């Protein structure tokens, strides 16, 4: 995911800077002597809300306080993973990281620590399905913060960036292409596996080639791309795993949107559907319901379950006197 640092001067085209080695483990980390007490961290003022007027309103502009607050947030995140996860719990974690980012932004900090905070925030916003936060984070992170810190963006961040815009504008790809054009070849090499993959995925979505979308969006395909890109940097296994989960969550969200569109196309094209083995195999792929997707982020639906749901929605009805055949109720 990261490569060895070369100096900025004389760097060859496409050769990235290495990132500084920062301990980004999501386990509780030791804070420095004199750390702000836990309760004080719990109620520390937000830079954006206090505008510097509230007592301690500028505290998070201090680099040392930011690092202490990161330890505090890390404890909260570690506890969150060990408990039953709720939407409120997800939102509270995102709020804590947003408060820390506000302090980093207000202090104009641009180093490996700032990058780490933004990357974790980005992955969590994708995992927790908070596109507003994802957009806000990306607007500062890529490419601006990476450029300021002289750090090469990991391919996971680049793919999250592009997948987010594919989802946000779906089925339009206008914003996707606008943001793709903002990425220089040093950030996303146009001959790389990652670029070929995301470009082919976008093309297949645009041309309604859902069989191809299904093949490209299989977990093993993009997991290979991510694994190749990170092979030279094993300094942060926790963040690597989190970034993989974030990419996977976005791909599954995109598959869901494509599935809905594929069903509209299918309903308009066919009067009847059968339960023959050949038809089931084809529909499973066309509707992106492949059993290969077995993680918690996947749809988790078999074709039969999905068809039963469409019957309840009034999209299908069993054909009278014919076992294993359905009448397609046309879109009105």
Image (tube, helix red, strand yellow):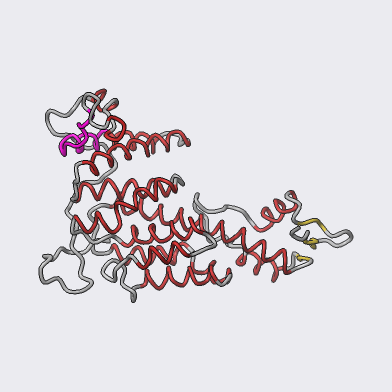
Between residues 171 and 279, which one lies in front from this camera angle?
171
Label the magenta part by its dominant secondary structure. Answer: helix
Please state, as top left, top right, bottom left or bottom right, where the C terminus lies in the image: bottom right
Does 77 appear in magenta? no
- Asked whether, in this view, residue 84 is left or right of residue 29, the answer is right
Does 62 appear in magenta? yes
Expressed as whole percent of the image width and height from the top left, the position of residue 105 reads 24, 44
- Asked whether, in this view, residue 311 is left or right of residue 27, the answer is right
Expressed as whole percent of the image width and height from the top left, the position of residue 18 reads 18, 61
Q: How many marks?
A: 0
The residue sitting at 77% across, 61% down in the picture is 328
Residue 317, above or below 200? above
Q: Quadrant of residue 224?
A: bottom left
Expressed as whole percent of the image width and height from the top left, the position of residue 251 reads 47, 58
Expressed as whole percent of the image width and height from the top left, the position of residue 141 reads 29, 53
Magenta segment: 57-72
Between residues 106 and 262, which one lies in front from this camera angle?
106
Furthest toward the right, the residue is 321
- Asked whether, in this view, residue 198 is left or right of residue 330, the answer is left
């Amino acid at each position: 995911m990261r490569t060895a640092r070369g100096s900025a001067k004389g760097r060859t085209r496409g050769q990235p800077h290495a990132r500084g080695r920062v301990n980004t483990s999501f386990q509780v980390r030791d804070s420095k002597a004199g750390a702000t007490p836990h309760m004080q961290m719990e109620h520390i003022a937000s830079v954006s809300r206090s505008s510097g007027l509230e007592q301690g309103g500028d505290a998070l502009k201090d680099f040392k306080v930011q690092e202490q607050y990161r330890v505090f947030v890390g404890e909260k995140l570690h506890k969150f993973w060990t408990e039953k996860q709720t939407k409120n719990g997800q939102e509270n974690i995102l709020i804590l990281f947003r408060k820390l980012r506000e302090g980093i932004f207000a202090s104009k900090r641009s180093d490996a620590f700032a990058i780490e905070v933004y990357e974790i925030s980005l992955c969590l916003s994708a995992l927790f399905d908070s596109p507003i936060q994802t957009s806000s984070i990306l607007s500062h992170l890529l490419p601006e913060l990476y450029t300021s810190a002289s750090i090469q963006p990991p391919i996971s961040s680049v793919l999250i960036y592009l997948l987010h815009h594919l989802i946000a504008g779906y089925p339009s790809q206008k914003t996707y292409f606008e943001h793709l054009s903002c990425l220089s070849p040093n950030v996303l090499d146009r001959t790389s596996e990652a670029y070929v993959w995301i470009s082919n995925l976008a093309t297949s979505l645009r041309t309604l080639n859902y069989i191809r979308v299904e093949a490209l969006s299989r977990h093993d395909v993009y997991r290979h791309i991510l694994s190749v890109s990170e092979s030279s940097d094993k300094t942060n296994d926790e963040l690597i795993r989190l970034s993989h989960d974030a990419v996977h969550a976005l791909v599954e969200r995109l598959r869901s949107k494509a599935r809905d569109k594929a069903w509209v196309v299918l309903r308009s094209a066919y009067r009847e559907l059968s339960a023959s083995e050949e038809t089931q195999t084809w529909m499973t792929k066309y509707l992106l319901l492949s059993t290969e997707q077995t993680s918690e982020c996947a749809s988790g639906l078999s074709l039969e379950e999905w068809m039963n749901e469409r019957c309840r929605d009034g999209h299908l009805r069993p054909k009278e006197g014919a076992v294993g055949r359905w009448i397609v109720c046309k879109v009105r």
